[in-house]
Image (spheres, rainbow, N blue to C red):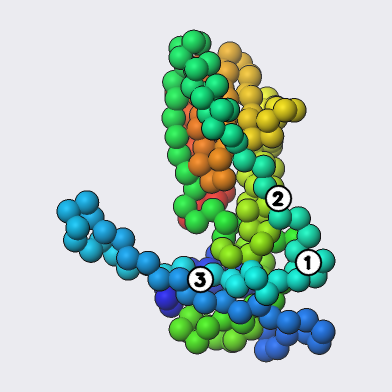
């Protein structure tokens, strides 16, 4: 648990405070514990994730937008069919702990559990946490901003999670489902570059 809190601290998630400003309430956080197992049934590792109790958030104060566009299963089917028809290479990757990489636009204060071993009890969030109502929306916006920063990338007008890239003879399609990415392209080297570019921004 201390390792999880330490990692979040080192990534700039918290701005520690002595107390919460007058008129604001701190949202409580808890640790969600999980066991991961090997295929043979033996224990792999114990995992702790710090989660905000988003059910205590107030609309208009702690959050505004919660909607996050994501691809439909029919879009995945269509993309794979087009890839086969056009002879493209298909790949998949995901972002580890995606939601905690997303910057927050709202001002949110949290109270950390004693198990976190933090130097102060209260903190202002600079990045999102799992459990926040706007967590998916914040990540979707961050992901879209990074993808659209690539020259030659165009977002579909009818499917907001579908992106088309065309430049210097390379053609690619990127389909997003939360923190999972399906990439179909005519140049495998472009996929390698895309993954490195993306993970350099959102994974240590």
**In the rendering, at what x and y percent does residue 37 appear?**
26, 59
**In the rendering, at what x and y percent does residue 63 appear?**
75, 64
Above or below, 174 relative to 45: above
Residue 173 occupies quadrant:
top right
Q: Quadrant of the N terminus?
A: bottom left
Label 1: which residue? 59
Q: If you read the primary sequence from the N terminus, does the residue marked by circle 1 or circle 3 appear first?
A: 3
Badge 1: how crowded within 10 Å, few (<14), some, or many (20+)? few
Q: If you read the primary sequence from the N terminus, does the residue marked by circle 2 or circle 1 appear first?
A: 1
Tell me: 9 left or right of 93. right
Q: Residue at x 66, y 77 (%)?
A: 27
Residue 169 occupies quadrant:
top right
Q: Residue at x 80, y 70 (%)?
A: 61
Q: Residue at x 59, y 34 (%)?
A: 72
Label 2: which residue? 67
Residue 153 occupies quadrant:
top right
**In the rendering, at what x and y percent does residue 2 appear?**
43, 77
Q: Secondary structure at mark 2?
A: loop
Circles 1, 3 touching at the beta carbon (< 8 Å): no
**From the viewer's perspective, is the residue at label 1 or at label 3 nearer?**
1
Along the line of sight, the residue nearer the viewer: 49 or 74? 74
Circles 2, 3 touching at the beta carbon (< 8 Å): no
Q: If you read the primary sequence from the N terminus, does the residue marked by circle 2 or circle 3 appear first?
A: 3
Spatial CA distance of label 2 from label 1 is: 13 Å
Label 3: which residue? 50
**In the rendering, at what x and y percent does residue 204 appear?**
48, 55
Q: Secondary structure at mark 1?
A: loop
Above or below, 198 relative to 14: above
């Amino acid at each position: 648990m201390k390792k999880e809190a330490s990692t979040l601290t080192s990534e700039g998630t918290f701005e520690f405070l002595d107390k919460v400003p007058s008129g604001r309430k701190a949202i409580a956080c808890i640790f969600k514990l999980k066991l991961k197992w090997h295929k043979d049934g033996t224990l792999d590792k114990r995992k702790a994730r710090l989660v905000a109790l988003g059910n205590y958030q107030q609309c208009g104060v702690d959050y505004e937008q919660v909607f996050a566009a994501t691809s439909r299963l029919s879009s995945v089917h269509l993309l794979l069919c087009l890839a086969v028809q056009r002879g493209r290479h298909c790949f998949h990757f995901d972002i580890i702990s995606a939601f905690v990489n997303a910057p927050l636009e709202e001002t949110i204060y949290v109270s950390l559990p004693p198990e976190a071993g933090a130097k102060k009890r209260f903190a202002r969030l600079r990045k999102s946490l799992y459990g926040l109502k706007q967590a998916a929306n914040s990540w979707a916006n961050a992901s879209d901003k990074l993808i659209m920063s690539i020259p030659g990338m165009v977002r579909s007008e009818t499917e907001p999670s579908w992106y088309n890239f065309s430049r210097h003879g390379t053609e690619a399609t990127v389909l997003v489902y939360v923190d999972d990415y399906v990439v179909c392209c005519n140049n495998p080297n472009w996929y390698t570059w895309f993954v490195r570019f993306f993970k350099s921004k959102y994974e240590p």
